[in-house]
Image (cartoon, grey):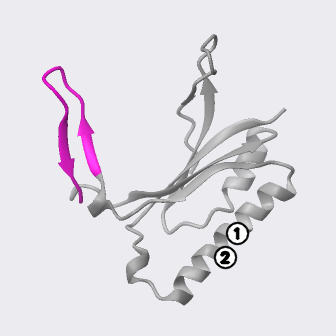
Amino acid sequence: MSAEYLIVIREPEWDPSVLSPEQIEMDLAGHRVFQEAVAAAGQRIAASAPLRPQSEATRIVPSASGAVFTDGPFGEVREVVTGFYTFTAGSPEQARELAALVPTGGWLELYPIAAIPGSADEIPLAVDAAVE
């Protein structure tokens, strides 16, 4: 039986607006290798997306007195989340092998996705199991 996993891609800022079409194609080719490997393993990618630059992000800190919103960029970080995948794998070992194919200029974090038992839709929650 397959389980679902989340890959968080962390690296220095990735901004496609400053890359040449050739650089973008090279990046995309690396992601296609991962996507094809997932399919060849009989698994599936449930969701994926590159994220817009950190300068367009908002940090939200909830509090009893109301949420505090801070627009990016956030100067205290060296690496940012630049994208993610959720995918299925037949075992933790297979998840690690497949995740290692995702290209990055930084590192990846791999989280098994858990479900809240007894919830109406088994709402998934990410649990900490980072892989570097």
Going by the picture, which residue comes out furthest to the front? Answer: 120
Q: Secondary structure at mark 1?
A: helix
Left or right: 87, with 69 as reference point:
right
Instruction: Identify which amino acid the numbered label 2 is placed on.
Output: Ala
Q: Position of residue 127 (x, y in %)?
A: 54, 30
Q: Which residue is mark 2?
A: 29
Q: Secondary structure at mark 2?
A: helix
Left or right: 77, with 38 as reference point:
left
> In percent of the image, x 82 and y 40: which residue is there?
90
Q: Position of residue 15 (x, y in %)?
A: 39, 73
> In percent of the image, x 39 and y 79: which residue is there?
17
Left or right: 22, with 2 as reference point:
left
Dots 2, 1 in contact, CB < 8 A: yes
Q: Which residue is mark 1?
A: 32
Q: Which corner quadrant holds the N terminus?
A: top right
The image shows residue 59, relative to residue 17, as above or below, that is above
> In percent of the image, x 53 and y 84: which residue is there?
23
Q: Quadrant of residue 66?
A: top left
Magenta range is 58-73
